[in-house]
Image (cartoon, helix red, strand yellow):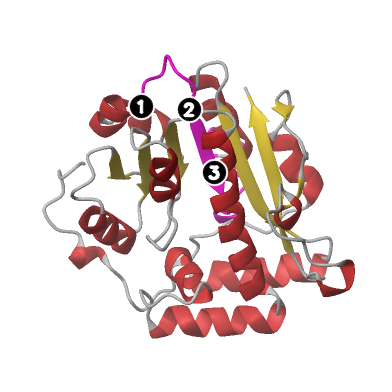
Amino acid sequence: MHHGAKSISHAIDVHTPSVARMYDWLLGGVENYPADRAACKELLTIAPSTQVLARNNRAFLRRVVRVLAQEYRIRQFLDHGSGLPTQDNVHQIAQGIDAASRVVYIDNDPIVLAHGRTTLAANDRTAVINADMRDTEMIFAHPDVQRLIDLTQPVAALFVSVLHCLPDTGDDNDPGALVKRVAGRLPPGSLLVLCHLVSDRPSVREEVTALMERSTHGNWGRVREQREVAAYFAGMRIIPPGLVDVVDWRPDTPPPPVERRATDWVEWGGVAQL
């Protein structure tokens, strides 16, 4: 674990909503503040299925880590924009299959860092590092990544419901450029997991993006369309069942019928092998 920072409590702004804390509230967690809850309630007026969507996304994370660990024998995970610790985290699932699995969580939210370091203090095969997920060079050079991740062996890089937090910049900070850069650093046989908030309704894309941009003081990107997310996988071999609504990715219970699915927005993506 990285313990370079002495204290990060002073950096916590409880008056500005945090995407990580909003997600925590949507999942029924308690590590959130009135500003986060107010933003979530406003979000629900625009996209009423948001809470269900968050839970579907968490279930997808559990399934995908289990599949990668059991069927693809992945023992190393880099979780970009990991969010607040909750039940069934990546390390709990992976290490439940093989205790030797190693996981590095990457986030720059001070509450995520504080809780992660406390939770993982006794787990020497897991670390949480303070980094902007776009800073690939810093991440791969970080002592905990150097200690835990062997780049001669396959790695799973996770971008689960985080790239919509990044704006389009047209440079190396662009979400597509980030995905390509990380994929280029991983050895053959590695896997990339990516899902993203998408909507085919312009009003939802515009209203959610405007709300989140305003609420988080610019710490947001935008809701995108499926075709834009599909472009992030360009040149990669997507494993079955392809790019889908995450409830349809290797479900372990019957997925909801069409009439019970969200009509405002969904988490959409899949897994590619490099």
| Real-space CA distance between mark 3 and mark 1, rounded to the nearest whole angstrom | 19 Å
Query: What numbered label is drawn on residue 149?
Result: 1
Image depth: mark 3 or mark 1 in front: 3
Instruction: Identify the residue at image location x=40%, y=36%.
Output: 98
Relative to 10, 178 lies left or right: right
In the image, the segment drawn in magenta is 149-173
Quarter of the figure with residue 236:
top right
Q: Does 233 sit above or below residue 204?
A: above
- Camera-side residue of 67 and 11: 67
- Camera-side residue of 35 and 105: 105
The x and y percentages for residue 50 are: 65, 73
Identify the image quadrant of the C terminus. top right
Q: Does 160 sit above or below residue 25?
A: above
Mark 3 or mark 1: whose residue is earlier in sequence: 3
Q: Is residue 160 magenta?
A: yes
Q: Name the outermost residue toward the right.
A: 259
Q: For mark 3, what is the residue?
A: 66
Relative to 230, 52 lies left or right: left
